[in-house]
Image: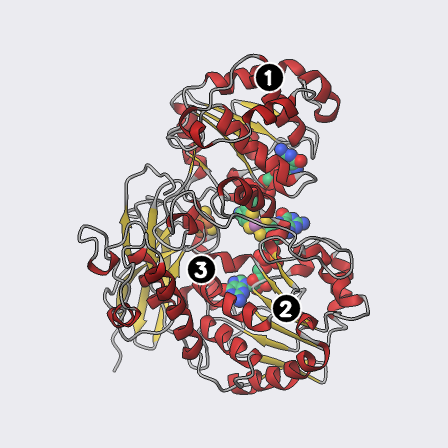
Amino acid sequence: MSTTATRTAFRTCPLCEAGCGLEVTVAGSNGDERVTRIRGDRDDVFSHGFICPKGSTLRQLHDDPDWLRRPMVRRDGRFVEVTWDEAFAEVERRLLPIVEQRGRDAVAVYVGNPNAHSLSGLLYLRPLIRALGTTNVFSASTVDQRPKEVSSGLMFGGGLTVPVPDVDRTDFLLMLGANPYASNGSLATAPDWPGRIEALIARGGTLVVVDPRRSRTAEQATQHVAIRPGADPFLLMALVNVLAADDLVDTGPAGEYLAGVDEVVALARPFTPEAVAAVTGVEPGTVRKLARDLAAAPRACVYGRIGTTTALYGTITSWLVDVLNALTGNLDRPGGAMFTRAAAGASNTRGRPRYGRGLTVHRRRSRVRGAGETLGELPVACLAEEIDTPGEGQVRALVTVAGNPVLSTPNAGRLDAALATLDLYVAVDPYINETTRHADVILPPPTPLQKSHYDLALLQLALRNVANYSPAVLPLADGQLDEWKILARLALITQGMGAGADPAVVDDLVVQTLIGAAVGDETSPVAGREPAEILALLGERTGPERLIDLMLRTGPHGDGFGARPGGATPAVPPALPASTRYRKSGACRTA
Ligand SMILES: Nc1nc2c(c(=O)[nH]1)N[C@H]1C(S)=C(S)[C@@H](COP(=O)(O)OP(=O)(O)OC[C@H]3O[C@@H](n4cnc5c(=O)[nH]c(N)nc54)[C@H](O)[C@@H]3O)O[C@H]1N2
Ligand SMILES: Nc1nc2c(c(=O)[nH]1)N[C@H]1C(S)=C(S)[C@@H](COP(=O)(O)OP(=O)(O)OC[C@H]3O[C@@H](n4cnc5c(=O)[nH]c(N)nc54)[C@H](O)[C@@H]3O)O[C@H]1N2
Ligand code: SF4
Ligand SMILES: [Mo]
């Protein structure tokens, strides 16, 4: 006997930073359910029904016959399906001797972009990387936003303490090197960027786009400034120069926190609009007017994205973006560049305001070319040479998690060739692609519809303070393994605990570490409480749900496990069956 029922599930789209709410229709009986429709969730507090063509394809992704459902091991040059136990045994058998004989740096790890949207990646990669204990940690960040993280770390104390443009309330947006009409926004999380830009222009606001190309966003802009590639820091310095020369510097609310304004003004003195014109290709008159308009706008913000970070002087450019926000009084005020007050995971909502460790860079260098470390990683541009250059510390094994560096990183041909020479390559990835085709073991995660979701990283960069959690829409099929368990088991193998060790061991360690940090933080709502009490209050759960619940409840909007009766108690399943959302007011400031 079969009953066919239809149900509606809600799910945040994990495919880009916009984080749109999706309404998913599921039909079928138990064990044989399929998604019949995906559309934008009109009741989503952030996306209000917005969806792009990619969002509706989660079903096709789920049904894609190429999405691996079983682990694969290479035998005699061909991939064969194996059980999870066999796959992990293979990793253990081949990885441990490499570490033993050649040292920890002989194993490199590369983590790719989808980890930024994955609870498994965000919560369980760290234990794996720590267990590997290698210097050779690489990620997509070093071909993306790393310069902005470094400048933000140096200016504001944390790599993710990046001020975001308050597009919804600004009068003037100066955008460099971003094309949100194509990308849907980046390091400025908000669904429907095009709609937000159109609203800005409809209310009489101004959008100036600085881009060598006439991008789709430039076409919509009030003004397009066609700069020469890589010349952004010269343009921004010239803007500082004009602000100072015309006596337009007014630091506004953030002024009392600023240091070095006079030094910056002095540094900008040689960079007159005339002096930089040959480099930037921008008329001096255009630069003068831009600086004056920026200063005159009641609320303005400057926003730079990937065209400014994947460039020479990317860190200086990223810094200058916020220097301009500060000098025009637009840093940390509505309609300017603001700091999100994220509900979970943000380092800037923990500890005593204005006290922290700051950011130290270049604590070590890469073996071959001596490139400096940032935020615990080496530039991925160095990966190929670390593999194909013999000597002490040469990389002989690689673990990739959700990355395709043969497509996404520089000098990819050399990397492609180098990967073929490794003694062991383990990929946590659902596809056989340009990179993973070189793998010896592929460990595939479940599909997005089979995972719960909370944008732990990107909600720290959201234009409005929002917290959206959604449970998995579909259950795992027989033979699939949660991604967090894959990462945890790899960590346990690396620590010598064996291929069969229980991933719950890692999970318990992570939750205990997080609880320890929370009760030990004098500013936390659970400061001084017994770790065992908090652990018990979290209930009998394993996996990301328990961790995210803890983070939300001890976060700046949470109930603090009873300490803040008015605070939100974001119930994460099994307490609540459906998507849970809560929203705080739009204004945001750092602690
Ligand atoms: N030429 C050029 N290069 C670029 C860029 C560019 O615009 N042009 N952009 C740069 C930028 S901004 C970035 S972020 C990087 C991206 O660089 P990467 O992160 O290396 O590349 P992606 O193509 O995002 O790779 C995603 C991988 O994750 C796998 N995957 C998808 N979902 C999951 C999952 O749930 N779990 C796991 N474990 N794996 C999953 C996919 O199969 C794929 O192998 O590329 C950078 N490089
Ligand atoms: N459909 C789709 N959407 C995506 C992604 C995807 O792969 N596909 N990837 C996502 C990811 S990982 C990211 S990081 C974001 C990136 O999102 P964005 O940062 O918005 O990046 P792009 O859309 O590549 O736009 C970058 C712009 O910078 C311009 N540019 C290039 N060089 C320079 C320069 O020297 N100076 C200036 N001022 N501009 C320059 C380019 O012409 C381009 O228009 O997109 C996300 N959205
Ligand atoms: S804009 Fe991004 S988050 Fe929204 S539906 Fe498209 S891919 Fe998904
Ligand atoms: Mo990216």
Looking at this view, name the residue that lies furthest to the left: 565
Towards the viewer: 267 or 292: 267
Q: CA distance from mark 1 to mark 3?
A: 49 Å
Q: Residues within 10 Å of mark 1 (few under 14, many from 20)?
A: many
Relative height, residue 275 to residue 406 (above, below): above
Point out the tag, 2 or 1, that comes first from the N-terminus. 2
Relative height, residue 154 to residue 547 (above, below): above
Number of the label disc, if any, that sits on residue 58? 3
**Res. 125 visible in picture:** yes
Secondary-structure class at tag 3: helix
- Report the residue marked by disc 1: 242
Looking at this view, name the residue that lies furthest to the right: 390
Q: CA distance from mark 3 to mark 2?
A: 35 Å
Secondary-structure class at tag 2: loop
Give the residue type that dot 3 points to: Leu
Number of the label disc, if any, that sits on residue 134? 2
Relative to 417, is 493 on the left or the right?
A: left
Mark 3 CB within 8 Å of ligand 3: no
